[in-house]
Amino acid sequence: MPSDENLTEFLRRRKSEAQDRDDPPVDWEKAKQDWLEGIGGLYRSIREWLSGAEGEGLVKFRQGTVRISEDHLGMYDAPTLSLDLGDKSVDLVPSFRLTLGALGRVNAFCGARKALILRSDDVRWGIGIREPGASRIVPLTEESFQDLLKDLTR
């Protein structure tokens, strides 16, 4: 904002620029459906990655739902996935579609331990890693997910 422009002038200019762009309105229902489909894809990948362990009786899957309320998306039910790993359980619970720096967030819980799984675009997911002084996102792969499970269940 130029220093000689007051807030009212700034807002008028922004409104005019938006009208000139003629941006289509956001289809929030489609955004919600894409988000739910993305969660389904995430869970399918996890089941595939752990299919060998499931076949040996080392992991059992339980599905559930969680009710989420978000601005623009309203109230909706999202699928959850719990992984029973012997004496520990890891619960994957969608948290938000509308989250800063990502296209959605799924929390992974094991007791008091928690990790973030973040959707980076329509097909890619990552694991949010918090480190002293910085954070980063590691691409979600079979290997990184297995590392996540080991970290959560220590």
Image (tube, rainbow, N blue to C red):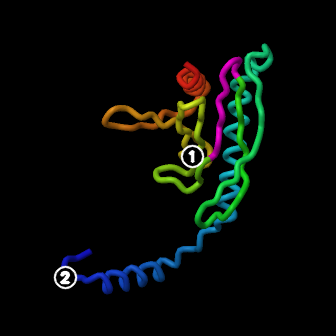
Asked if residue 27 is positioned above or below residue 149 in the image, the reply reads: below
Q: Position of residue 93 (x, y in %)?
A: 65, 42
Q: Is residue 37 left or right of residue 4?
A: right
Q: Earlier in the sequence, mark 1 or mark 2?
A: 2
Q: Position of residue 46 (x, y in %)?
A: 68, 31
Q: Position of residue 69 (x, y in %)?
A: 64, 59
Is residue 30 or residue 114 the one in the foreground? 114
Q: Main secondary structure of the magenta part?
A: strand
Is residue 79 or residue 146 the one in the foreground? 79
Q: Check the image and name the residue furthest to the front.
A: 112
User: Mark 1 sits on what residue?
Assistant: 105
Residue under the point 58% across and 74% down: 24
Q: Is residue 41 left or right of residue 148?
A: right
Amino acid on which the number 1 mark rests in the picture = Arg
Q: Position of residue 80 (x, y in %)?
A: 71, 41
Whether residue 22 appears in magenta in the rendering, the answer is: no
Q: Quarter of the image holding residue 10?
A: bottom left
Name the mark on residue 4. 2
Q: For label 2, count other residues whose C-alpha is less than 10 Å away and answer few (under 14), some (14-19) or many (20+).
A: few
The segment highlighted magenta reads: 85-94
Amino acid on which the number 2 mark rests in the picture = Asp
For label 1, the SS is strand
Residue under the point 73% across and 35% down: 44
Quadrant the N terminus occupies: bottom left
Residue under the point 74% across and 46% down: 65
Q: Is residue 2 left or right of residue 36?
A: left
Which mark is in front, 1 or 2? Answer: 1
Q: Quarter of the image holding residue 97?
A: bottom right
Q: For label 1, count other residues whose C-alpha is less than 10 Å away and answer few (under 14), some (14-19) or many (20+).
A: many
Residue under the point 42% across and 84% down: 16
